[in-house]
Amino acid sequence: MTVGLVAATAAGRRHARILADAWPHARLVESAGVADALRTAWTEHGAVVAFLATGAVVRILAPLLGDKRTDPAVVVVDEAARHAVALLGGHAGGANTLAGEVAALLDARPVVTTATDAVGLPGLDTLGWPVEGAVAAVSRAILDGEPVRLLADATWPLPALPPNVLVETAPTDAATPTDSVVAGRHRADSTDPEGGTGDGGWRLLVTDRIVPLDERTAVLRPPSLVAGIGSSRGVAAAEVSALLHRALADAGLAPASLRCLASVDLKADEEGILATARALGVPLRTRPAAELAAVDVPHPSEVVRAVVGTPSVAEAAALAGGGTLLVPKTASAMATVAVARHAPRGRLAVVGLGPGAPDLRTPRAVAELRRAAVVVGLDQYVDQVRDLLRPGTRVLASGLGAEEERARAAVAEATAGQAVALVGSGDAGVYAMASPALEYADERVDVVGVPGVTAGLAAAALLGAPIGHDHVYLSLSDLHTPWEVIERRVAAAAEADLVALLYNPRSRARDWQLGAVLKTFAAHRPPGTPVGVVRNASRDGEQVHLATVSTLDPAVVDMYSVVVVGSSQTRVVGGRMVTPRGYRWQR
């Protein structure tokens, strides 16, 4: 998305240049007058940042307003660059996010007035899925705390919703929860001459089915459908599209729930299929013929096998990966379509929270915490981020020593279809929760890794530049690794002349191991080799201590510390540890 920048004053142009220098996708739009420039930016760019008065922007753009789903995002910045106001396209256009990005570059304050954002609730149009029906009315009901029934055909990984959104399951006489809603609507229509939902309640449906809409019902379209497509060479996009839409309509299925189109890899360049996918806004995914041939289908064809190498293209492509066939293959002159429903996959985000300081926590980590319905973690880490969680988030916190139980709990919740964030300090993949969790997560779960600033990186930054060359991370805890193995690894790092970052260096129960490790390093390093100790890096009580491999007193080290042992080339310059990038030291 390109960003058009519009400014009327010298100060505004200075602020605009800051954005233009930072963003290759942004450019200053200039014209004979500021009104023409603003209209040009609106027409030619996906987003507009205007360094103008809000009133002026409103008056100029008012005649151009069309639909919030297609209008550009507009952010307005005042003359002093104190505020970045998301004026238009808050959710759908991305203005709320853009206001935050502009504010970060200009050291301004983002101003977001969208109701759901203001109170920390997820907007129905921000979940990444198409939404239909009475979206504004149901969103307002959620905001106002009115009871809203959430009925879904399956458990999808939605973010946390507030307690007034009541999740209901299917009754025994209905195939899915939405079946009961449709039936209830028809019963209400038969007795209520005024129409409506019958019970006067608010409903949020999550379904791929075409359902009747009213003024109190919104529908989220989950990406549950895969359409398998086969065709003759040179098929027209109009034919593929018409056949697909007819098949979906006959089955009562919503095109907005298509996850992708699928075919054999021989059709990866078939323009008629590609154009249909582009028009629907979904990808085309192809598989080798041999892989499709292994999929059990109800209507195989030996004629197709002879031509393509698989007895089925449309049905096999739709079913590949474990779907349930809803629309058996149906054909036109040059195309074949089949549609399958695929079960939801849970979502497990393994989130590194950084070393402790909030400003060292990445925006992606914050976004994943707010995306989650369930947060799992060590109690002291969860306490650091409770203020970031949306209302209704379920928290599973436990104490030290329960790593495996936390991993199992997080994976179990994700396997059940929930959106889960499993949190840990530093980076989730460095002596943290990613490894134990991924030992249990299978193909039913989508895994998202969110990197974080490690304690070692935070400590190194405080010490200077000790890891400017090759280095190694070593944990001295023998809780999961026998001490004999740790000793061999320490000896190898010492002999290789690697800078070593020592995690879990010393505790009350392990008070001798660090001294033994220092002796091993001292046997391979000059006695003056610098050693740094950082305690509580980036947290309250932060302490930095410099010594040498021969003088460090292990008593100053505890489990809140990271110890950095320099290589033979590491020096102290200006009170800071420095390991030269090359092995030439300029004296």
Image (spheres, helix red, strand yellow):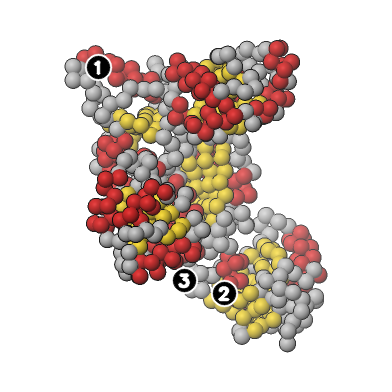
| Number of the front mark, 1 or 3 | 1
What amino acid does circle 3 point to?
A: Asp
Q: Residue at x 24, y 13 (%)?
A: 190
Q: Earlier in the sequence, mark 2 or mark 3?
A: 2
Residue designated by label 3: 540
Q: Residues within 10 Å of mark 2 (few under 14, many from 20)?
A: many
Q: Is residue 470 above or below residue 273?
A: below
Q: Tag 3's secondary structure? A: loop
Name the residue at the bottom extreme. Answer: 587
What amino acid does circle 1 point to?
A: Asp
Q: Residues within 10 Å of mark 3 (few under 14, many from 20)?
A: few
Name the residue at the front extreme. Answer: 32
Q: Residue at x 37, y 49 (%)?
A: 42
Residue designated by label 2: 462
Q: Is residue 241 above or below residue 543?
A: above
Q: Tag 1's secondary structure? A: helix
Q: Residue at x 33, y 22 (%)?
A: 212
